[in-house]
């Protein structure tokens, strides 16, 4: 089977490594009269990455195909966590620390548990956000963005 | 000798309430993170990293040292009481600790673990204090070509130490090296791999790499993990621990023997000095040695306190050992020392021989804290909080990971007050998560990223000095030493197959 999850990951890494090597080659000749140039080391590293990646892809292709457990439900929570972090970062400065962090912590608590007792979870989120604010802003002197400037 | 006096003078810094608060807080946080299955002291340290911007270097390093020591012994709490090692370094402790718990001697097992950790931590710290200045002096003999060979040795050893995963480890190291090459070239005014993006000109910052690799990746890993804490909580509820049972009787200590403690400490210490070996290897080797030399090897795995003593002495002695290459050569032995190295670099301190002389006052308090944590905080924490620590596993997973994610993301903002660093941390977290999920050891990626810039610089300088002659790496004695050392490690770890010890079975 040419496409399964570990193989797709290796193909992505291979594509990145090839892109890296091409960019390294575009930096110029690896050796000049004055010695090694800035492209030498990246070419070496890119080449090594492609070598290791090829070995791993060949190993996976030669290996027995793993039995797919269709009865195990797939868990996509990690993807939702990534989405939550992404939107949290986007809203961090425009919305300010309190609103963005409150929504973020609430979203994560719900993602890690269930869509129940939402009021209790909202209250916990508010407490966490305030404690973290006191810790960063007051204790460690970190200036966090707020709507009031 | 001056350095040793400086370290002992640094104990006065621990009398400062501000420093002492951070040391105690660091120790408690490290113990809590090590005790909760799935969390590690490395994660605690990664979350602490942004805070170090607001602390003095001495205080930050002191807090790091106490987290490190706590991380090595905290995992034994759940390993003994519910047979789930909180940290990988406590795996061997569970072999004899949990049977003792089943025999109703859980508190005694915890007492033996604390005593072993105390002795191991103290011996490791004392050896570090005594040995590090000499290693620093020896490191002055290592010139440019030798430095390249040493860094190459460190990366190669970490890669080949991942038995059965050498190709994965090699690829992970390459990814780390690739990340290290982003930004301005160290020797010529040329930017590389920035693709016109000015935020990348200065390179990829250490902070998002560490926070992403250890904190965000951990949150993502736990998001897909199906481990239900209710089983841990139910098991923890059944455990009853009384303070008066903690103290190991003298007859038990005599039976274990002074030699076993010291031998395990030395094994742990020397394993710690090897890049990538870590606490779990130290405790495994010490446990194996204790079984091998015991007159009653059949009692191991059934509740023999000697197994706990060997394992815990070794994994805590690793702390001292792992700091030797980090402080003297800038080569971290494990993820925690890698983060400590980050604290130094963030504060503009370059590890190396001069660190033990010109900047010794900055380092000495950290070593004093390591010793203080081992001798004072380990027994004190066990006595005061021991009966309650087991309840830690009942903590709500949803709240815990939401807090970790918040601290990680906001923490990555602290360094530059820029959301770019937050996106970088997220990107690194996603990368590290998929690497871990596909069986890639992320420590090799981190080591590649940390050592990459120096590796490239010393390679180019060496060849420039020798007019491009690559034989310089075998004609210079310092470089030849590390080349031969690399070959020895390759022989023992790759070519010669390890022999299996039939008497030791982890059963895990």
Image (cartoon, coloured by chain):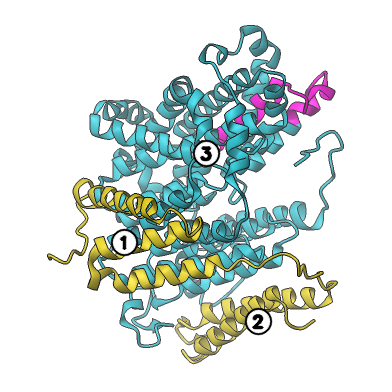
The tint chain B carries is: cyan
Task: Relative to A39, say whether B26 is above or below.
Answer: above
If the image is split into quadrants, where does the C terminus of chain A sit?
Answer: bottom left
- Marks 2 and 1, how far apart in space? 36 Å
Q: Which residue is mark 1?
A: A101
Residues shaded magenta: B289-318
Q: Is residue A94 left or right of residue B160?
A: left
- Label 1: few (<14), some (14–19) or many (≥20) C-alpha neighbours in 10 Å: many
Residue A11, numbered circle: 2
Residue B488 on image: x %, y %: 72, 53
Query: x and y percent of residue B113 in the render?
Result: 59, 25
The chain letter for the residue carrying disc 1 is A
Per the image, is B282 magenta? Answer: no
Q: Which residue is mark 3?
A: B394
Quadrant in the picture for residue B442: bottom right
Q: Nearer the viewer, residue B155 or B136?
A: B155
């Amino acid at each position: 089977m040419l496409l399964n999850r570990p193989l797709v990951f290796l193909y992505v890494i291979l594509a990145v490594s090839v892109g890296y090597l091409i960019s390294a080659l575009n930096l110029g000749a690896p050796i000049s009269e004055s010695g090694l140039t800035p492209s030498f080391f990246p070419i070496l590293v890119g080449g090594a990455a492609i070598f290791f990646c090829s070995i791993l892809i060949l190993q996976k292709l030669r290996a027995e195909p793993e039995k797919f457990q269709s009865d195990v439900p797939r868990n996509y929570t990690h993807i939702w966590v990534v989405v939550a972090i992404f939107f949290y970062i986007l809203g961090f400065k425009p919305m300010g620390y309190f609103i963005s962090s409150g929504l973020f912590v609430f979203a994560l608590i719900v993602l890690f548990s269930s869509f129940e007792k939402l009021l209790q979870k909202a209250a916990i989120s508010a407490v966490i956000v305030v404690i973290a604010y006191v810790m960063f802003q007051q204790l460690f002197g970190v200036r966090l963005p707020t709507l009031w400037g | 000798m001056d350095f040793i006096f400086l370290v002992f003078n640094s104990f006065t810094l621990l009398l400062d309430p501000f420093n002492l608060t951070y040391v105690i807080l660091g120790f408690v946080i490290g113990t809590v993170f090590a005790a909760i299955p799935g969390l590690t002291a490395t994660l605690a340290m990664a979350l602490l990293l942004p805070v170090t911007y607001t602390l003095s270097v001495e205080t930050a390093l002191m807090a790091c040292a106490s987290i490190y020591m706590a991380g090595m012994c905290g995992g034994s709490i759940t390993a003994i009481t519910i047979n789930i090692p909180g940290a990988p370094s406590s795996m061997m402790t569970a072999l004899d600790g949990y049977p003792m718990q089943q025999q109703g001697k859980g508190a005694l097992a915890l007492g033996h673990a604390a005593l072993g950790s105390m002795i191991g931590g103290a011996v490791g710290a004392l050896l570090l204090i005594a040995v590090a200045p000499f290693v620093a002096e020896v490191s002055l003999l290592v010139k440019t070509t030798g430095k390249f060979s040493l860094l190459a040795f460190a990366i190669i050893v970490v890669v080949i130490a991942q038995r059965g995963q050498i190709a994965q480890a090699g690829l992970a190291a390459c990814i780390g090296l690739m990340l290290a090459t982003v930004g301005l070239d160290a020797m010529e005014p040329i930017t590389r791999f920035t693709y016109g993006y000015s935020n990348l000109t200065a390179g990829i910052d250490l902070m998002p790499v560490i926070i992403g690799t250890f904190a965000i990746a951990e949150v993502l890993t736990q998001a897909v993990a199906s481990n239900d804490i209710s089983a841990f909580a139910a098991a923890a509820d059944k455990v009853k621990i009384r303070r008066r049972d903690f103290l190991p009787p003298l007859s038990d200590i005599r039976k274990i023997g002074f030699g076993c403690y010291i031998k395990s400490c030395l094994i742990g210490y020397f394993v710690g000095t090897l890049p990538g070996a870590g606490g779990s290897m130290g405790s495994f080797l010490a446990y194996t040695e204790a079984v091998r030399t015991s007159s009653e090897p059949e009692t191991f795995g059934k509740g023999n306190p000697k197994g706990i003593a060997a394992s815990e002495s070794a994994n805590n002695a690793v702390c001292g050992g792992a700091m030797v290459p980090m402080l003297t050569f800038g080569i971290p032995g494990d993820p925690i020392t890698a983060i400590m190295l980050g604290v130094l670099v963030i504060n503009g301190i370059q590890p190396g021989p001069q660190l033990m002389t010109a900047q010794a006052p900055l380092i000495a308090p950290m070593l004093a804290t390591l010793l203080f944590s081992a001798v004072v905080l380990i027994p004190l924490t066990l006595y005061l909080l021991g009966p309650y620590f087991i309840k830690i596993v009942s903590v709500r997973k949803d709240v815990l990971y939401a807090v970790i994610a918040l601290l990680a993301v906001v923490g990555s903002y602290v360094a530059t007050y820029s959301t770019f660093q937050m996106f970088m941390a997220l990107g690194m977290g996603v990368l590290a998560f998929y690497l871990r999920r596909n069986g890639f050891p992320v420590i090799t990626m981190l080591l590649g990223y940390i050592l990459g810039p120096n590796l490239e610089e010393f390679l180019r300088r060496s060849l420039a000095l020798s007019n491009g002659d690559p034989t310089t790496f075998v004609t210079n004695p310092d470089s030849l030493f590390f080349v031969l050392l690399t070959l020895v490690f390759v022989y023992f770890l790759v070519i010669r197959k390890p022999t299996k010890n039939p008497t030791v079975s982890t059963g895990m």
